[in-house]
Image (cartoon, rainbow, N blue to C red):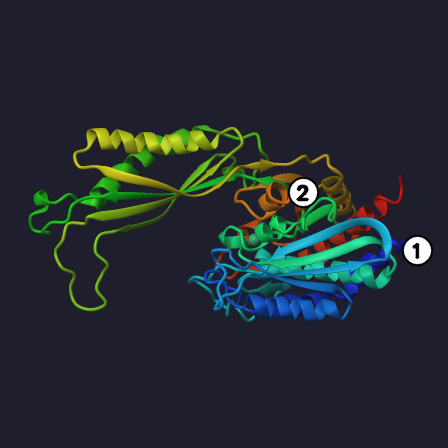
Amino acid sequence: MVPAVESILADIEARRAEMVELCRDLVRIPTVNPPGSDYPEFARYLGARLRERHFELYFERARGSDADSDSFPRINLIARKSGGRPGPCVHFNGHMDVVPPGAGWSVDPFAGEVRDGRIFGRGTADMKGGIAAAVVAVEVLVDRWPDFPGALELSATVDEESGGLAGVGYLAEQGWFDPRRVQHVVIPEPLDPERICIGHRGVWWAEVSLSGRIGHGSMPHLGACAIRHAAAFLQLLEEELRPRLAQRRTAMPVVPEAARRPSLTLHSIHGGQMPPARGLPTPCVADRCTVILDRRFVVEESPDQVRAEVLELLERLARTRPGFAFELRELLLVEPLWGDAGGLLPRTFARAVEEVLGIAPAFVCSPGTYDHKHVLRIGRQPSCIAYGPGRLEQAHQPDEHIAIDDMVRASQVMALAALRLLTQAQTP
Ligand SMILES: [Zn+2]
């Protein structure tokens, strides 16, 4: 029999402390990327937990992918449980990797400290809190409803923060998200529990290498300084491209509001001689300087336009600036994605958010990309959203944290929505 909604919600509330401990355990496994450490330990830990509930487990190592190595193996976990009756498969996917903690923490980033109703630590919001909420939601469903129709799946995947090719990208290539075996995919990324995310902006990363000519630092006129070439390029970016981007505004519902405009981040600049470990540098004119650009774009802009706008500035400098030589290398291109809020999956989640939180959720797009792109473009799976308990502005911050109340409520939303999705196919 289909369990009563109240009993599912009450079961999740009753497992609040267990959910907190699960999140803390996951935070204590320092799956930092780069380099991608402790993935096997994370997969084993979560697998062991789900094996107790008789989930079938699959450990998929992305052998042959660029990032995979014996020192840092890219191991993905998929756990599946079927209720033994026909029905759809609802899949929850979370990335196990976290970005390095960086500076500025007032707590140990890998201790999972609990204070004032919140859990602190790298990855609490992005997205181990979301994984813990999804795991408890699925466990409550299978415990209350052993003969549920269809199947429930949970996957914990690697490398989302570095493009996801060895994680969701790899699983999608292997057919794990094929619409013939999975009908709905939910990714509990931190986009706020009052929001349902149906897409993201596009991203273009490019490396611009500028070359000059080495010479003595006391006679710079006999060399050509690549750092000054870079400065001329940056000046054009600031004076021409940035104001142009500020004029554009997308119709995509990107959050936060400021991200409705396309953006340009100067990711890094490396030029000239490396500073010596000790002693003084030697006097040289810099013969190389590399700039990495992180350009985020919206559906109204095409990848060709994004590329051409940077190329035009570089070509102009090559024509007008003596000795200016450049090389442009594209590192990553992901097109923007804006899904349909009217599909069964987003509508079912919207109804569950209204019931649990008492508010109508906003349908939004993420400022950055996430694994949705692989589910859709490689997996050919159109029914995918991001919905999770973490708050967007906590992602990658020092003192990252997640509110325990948000985790419990998002878990209730996930369980309720999954219950409806599983029964939907039963009622014609
Ligand atoms: Zn994330």
Front-most of residues 15 and 304? 304
Q: Secondary structure at mark 2?
A: loop
Number of marks present in the image shown: 2
Front-most of residues 164 and 27? 164
Q: Position of residue 57 (x, y in %)?
A: 70, 64
Instruction: Give the quarter of the image for residue 2.
Output: bottom right
Q: Position of residue 248 (x, y in %)?
A: 47, 29
Left or right: residue 235 compared with residue 24 = left
Q: State whether residue 47 is above or below residue 166.
A: below
Residue at the spot 77% in from the left edge and 43% down from the top edge: 348
User: Which quadrant of the rendered structure holds the N terminus?
Assistant: bottom right
Please rate how many residues cluster around mark 1, counting C-alpha atoms within 10 Å: few if below 14, some from 14 to 19, many from 20. Answer: few
Is any part of residue 114 visible from this angle? no
Q: Position of residue 381 (x, y in %)?
A: 67, 42
User: Which quadrant of the rendered structure holds the C terminus?
Assistant: top right
Residue at the spot 52% in from the left edge and 37% down from the top edge: 335
Q: Secondary structure at mark 1?
A: loop
Q: State whether residue 241 is above or below residue 60.
A: above
Q: Amino acid at mark 2?
A: Gln
Q: Position of residue 11 (x, y in %)?
A: 81, 62
Q: Amino acid at mark 1?
A: Met
Is any part of residue 421 visible from this angle? yes
Q: Disc 1 versus disc 2: distance between alpha carbons?
A: 30 Å
Q: Which residue is mark 1?
A: 1
Left or right: residue 368 compared with residue 177 = left
Please rate how many residues cluster around mark 2, counting C-alpha atoms within 10 Å: few if below 14, some from 14 to 19, many from 20. Answer: many
Front-most of residues 8 and 92? 92
Residue at the spot 75% in from the left edge and 58% down from the top edge: 137
Q: Assess mark 2: CB under 8 A from ligand 1?
A: no
Front-most of residues 369 and 311? 311
Q: Which residue is mark 2?
A: 381
Mark 1 or mark 2, which has the lower sequence index? 1
